[in-house]
Amino acid sequence: MATEPVNEEVAGSCVDAGGSAIGMPQLCFDWFPNQIFWLVITLVVIFLVLSRVALPRIAAILAERKGTITNDLAAAEDLKAKAVEAEEAYNKALADARAEAQRIAAEARAEIQSGLDDAIAKADAEIAAKAAESEKAIAEIRAGALESIQLVAKDTAAELVTALGGEADAKAIDSAVDAQMKG
Amino acid sequence: MATETTAAEGSSLVFHPMDQFIVKPLFGDGAVGMFTITNVTLWLFLAIVAIVLLLIWPTSKRAIVPTRMQSVAELAYGFIYKMLEDICGKEGVKYFPYVMTLFMFIVCANFLGMIPMSFTTTSHFAVTIPLALAVFLTVTVLGFVKNGAGFLSLFWVSSAPLALRPILAIIELISYFVRPVSHSIRLAGNVMAGHAVIKVFAGFAAIAAISPVSVLAITAMYGLEVLVSFIQAYVFTILTCVYLKDALHPHH
């Protein structure tokens, strides 16, 4: 305010002749209506731009991303469950196959065993039959031998008696030999 | 300031730290009327452009996997949304576009003001006072509409001893009406002071011996001002949220 402005209309009361500010331009009330007017317009425009376009759009993007992430997580969970299921199915198939193999092996073993048992029984029966036959033959042979021994003993006794100068009494010799054989 | 200026005239050392805040018509040399298109108009318009470039242009693809710029837009959104929700609760979310408008405008205007030779709209009380008054009036009207006379319980500190309550009520009342003043002057004052200080340092650069120091000082101040630009926008917004909370839940 020290110097008089050259052009009052151009400079106003806030700017000196040199074009420099007089005091604080912030306190120049001549400019207030202009600033406030444009500020209000700017704020209204920004508010409309934000509330009509920018904010709904960003909210939609964020919501969509959240949805996508949630979906992906759910899908991952699903796939994981499926993998676990598949593993279980695989394990079950493995166990089944093992059991089947065991069953087949057991069956084969049982079959072999029964065949073996049959064969053994047959062989046993044959052996038994053969043994019985042999025993019979042996008994026969033994009986035959006993008879022969008696005969021989009697003959020998008679001969001995004769050789010693005696008279062979057939009856006495028989009884004596029988007695000796029994004893 | 004017005397300083005239005293320095003639020598090489010229300080005009406040000249950067002068409002002038963009076209012609006429007086600044209410509807004149001035540098204020230009830089306010550039703030709108900046907001469009920040929030609308990068999000136009609506990518699920965001680009860098889209991330910035989403971060800005999330930052203010979370601040509002944390302070005001679920009911406050309704006023999100309003709070976001304030934040985006202030932060864009502050950073546009950091461009050399630019005009800083937020350094003017004519800009910050309407902003603060708008918040003050909104909060007051909202408080009475939402709570009726119950809004006055904001001034009646029921947790204090009965004898102290009238005194506290007076203090609370005064502090309530001081809110728009501090709210607006804090923002304009911080921005204006920083810019003026940078200009003063720039004036010293004319002396060759001091100019390296001056350049360093300008650089340091510039860094500080970048910080202040964001912090003041943040402070303005968070205070708006706190005042909104008072309107929504006046009971302490």
Image: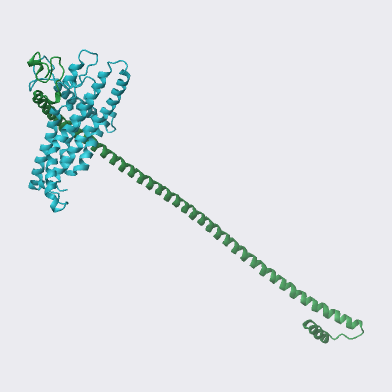
Say which quarter of the image contains residue B137.
top left
Quadrant where the N terminus of chain A sits is top left
Quadrant where the C terminus of chain A sits is bottom right
Residue B205 horizontal/vertical position (percent)? 28, 17
* Left or right of residue A152: residue B95: left
Residue B105 appears in the figure: no
Residue A24 horizontal/vertical position (percent)? 15, 24
* Left or right of residue A173: residue B176: left
At x 79%, y 85%, the residue is: A179
Say which quarter of the image contains residue B222.
top left
- Compare residues B143 and A137 and report the one nearer the observer: B143
Label the green chain with its letter.
Answer: A
Residue B196 appears in the figure: yes
- Colour scheme in the image? by chain
At x 27%, y 19%, the residue is: B204
- Determine whether B196 is above or below B77 in the image: above
- Determine whether A174 is above or below B71 in the image: below
Label the cyan chain with its letter.
Answer: B
Residue B100 horizontal/vertical position (percent)? 18, 34
- Compare residues B84 and B199 and report the one nearer the observer: B199
Residue B163 horizontal/vertical position (percent)? 13, 52
- Compare residues A83 and B63 and report the one nearer the observer: B63
